Amino acid sequence: MEKKSSGVVIQAFGNLLHVKFDGDIKQGEVCFVKINEKQLASEVIEIKEDIAKVQVFEDTSGIKLNTEVEFSSHLLEAELGPGLLTSIFDGLQNPLEKIAQKSGYFLSRGLYIPALDRERLWDFQPIVKVNDSVKRGDFLALVKESHFDHKIMFPFKYRREYKVTYIAPAGAYNIVTPILKAVDDEGHEIEVTMLQKWPVKIALKEGKRIDLTKIMLTGMRVLDTPFPVLKGGTFCTPGPFGAGKTVLQHHLAKHSKVDIVIIAACGERAGEVVEILREFPRIIDTKTNEPLINRTVIICNTSSMPVAAREASVYMAVTIAEYYRQMGLDTLVLADSTSRWAQAMREMSGRLEEIPGEEAFPAYLASRIAAFYERAGAISLKDGSVGSLTIGGAVSPAGGNFEEPVTQATLNVVGAFWGLSRERSDARRYPAIDPLISWTKYLDVSSLELDKYEVDWTEKVKKSLNIIKDGSEILRRMEVVGEEGIAIEEMIIYLKAELYDICFLQQNSFDPVDTFTPILRTVKMFQLMDQIFIKQFKFDSHNDARAYFLNLQNDLKNLNFLTFESPEYKELFNKVKDKLNI
């Protein structure tokens, strides 16, 4: 057995300890600080000669000079296997429900419980046979988890090819029972269980990265039409406090067309996380007809929990998502908020006395953010299936200032920018995604899929955005010179923009129909809007134009609350067509 290194504390600065050690350790290694028969989990973040700087994930009160520290010889790892879904973990993957059963409402220091249940039995169905050759990531067996076939994979830590010498027969086993034995060319034999571990800060990927081609539909018209994101892509949702970032992420978790959702509450307020914990078990997922929590994993590192674990929470979330992506599933990671993750990095950097960058953030802020988002993508697996990992991060810039470092570093690497604005939020225009500042790099690729519904999709979407921009400019002029100071043609453009905004871009999340818009309904509504855009209207006065469009606006607004198959919709649609003579 490998001998573990040890050391003693010689200095302490809040959560940062200076530890003098003997033996061999490595950066990122997990260690445990011993206090009154408790062991506090920590991470080595810097090594200089025989002094290690250690970040403690817990409250450090009680640590004294010469307090013992034991190094584990392994990095911060995620436990991967059946049983992840429906779980609620903290940033270190401790199951919070089980911890609550032991410690009550208040978390106890030094209490760590394995993430996955060692006693639960799983229905095991082998795929491989004796004498088959296997490599990292190869599927060994199937286990039913919720409505998914959880694919047991050959551990990713083994880089060589192995030959199977034993495979367990079909039956019920726990995750630590050896289900396979294999030997390599040199005669080294290994045992494999359904449980495997992987360092969270190292990307988990086996397969060929491929181009992104499929849209991740969200059921939100303002996203699916002008600002789509592809499966395997990246996006960010920056906005001031109260603009609706968390509500938007809740909608994405509920309605996005993906298989698995991983929510990382990174420094989020506890009350908002409680809302997730209460709602998700009650909401019936329309895709699976099961509670939404059954395809969700929640990582809770709220603002009331130890700040040192905040950095680990986003890596834990993306590692679990990568694991499910390796099964050929579409996964979505929602991190709320990456600004607080960056603040944790800033605090750590300050204690390390590193040279600060802009606004005291570390100089490597941009590279850390880029490395996180670059773990997204779509991969082709050996069996021909495709798995994808989409990453979306909420950004909370102070005062809604998008020029601050975290927002700017994020904008440099993401593929879509869904900017929320205080003006739209205050005007009760929901979702408060501002079409004047938002953008996407995926529009041209999305048209390859949407052209089957509507020819020249990209050009028509761009034309609608131009109408919104022109309408905004005309509105600013009207605020100065009044309606009488602009031409009748400009009034028509402004009214078209308002019509498009109110009847298409806005959505009623409290309405059972309008809260989610299927892609066919979105296309049909956009086709109607496009016919209005190209229609040449002739009016004798501003009042005639305004009266006509207000009447039409009310008719179209009702479309938001009707399904396309209903008689009410068909009656309204025909009424609008007759009115426009189209």
Image (tube, rainbow, N blue to C red):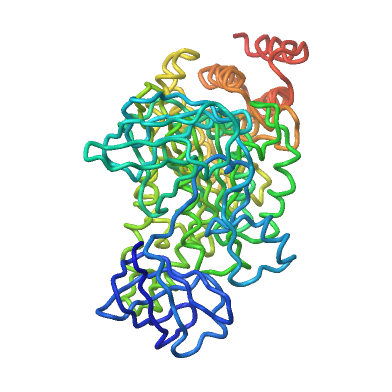
Location of residue 326 with respect to 308 vertically, above or below:
above
Q: Nearer the viewer, residue 264 or 141?
A: 141
- Quadrant occupied by the C terminus: top right
Residue shown at the point (47%, 27%) measured from the top left: 215
Rendered location of residue 77, percent (x, y): 44, 55
Q: Nearer the viewer, residue 560 or 356?
A: 356
State which quadrant residue 566 falls in: top right
Look at the image and tell me whether residue 26 can be seen.
yes
Rendered location of residue 493, percent (x, y): 53, 30
Rendered location of residue 54, percent (x, y): 41, 75
Location of residue 285 with respect to 251 vertically, above or below:
above
Residue shown at the point (32%, 76%) measured from the top left: 354
Location of residue 551 with respect to 336 vertically, above or below:
above
Residue shown at the point (52%, 40%) measured from the top left: 474
State which quadrant residue 83 falls in: top right
Rendered location of residue 287, percent (x, y): 64, 26
Location of residue 203 with respect to 24 vertically, above or below:
above
Most distant residue in the bottom direction: 65
- Quadrant occupied by the N terminus: bottom left
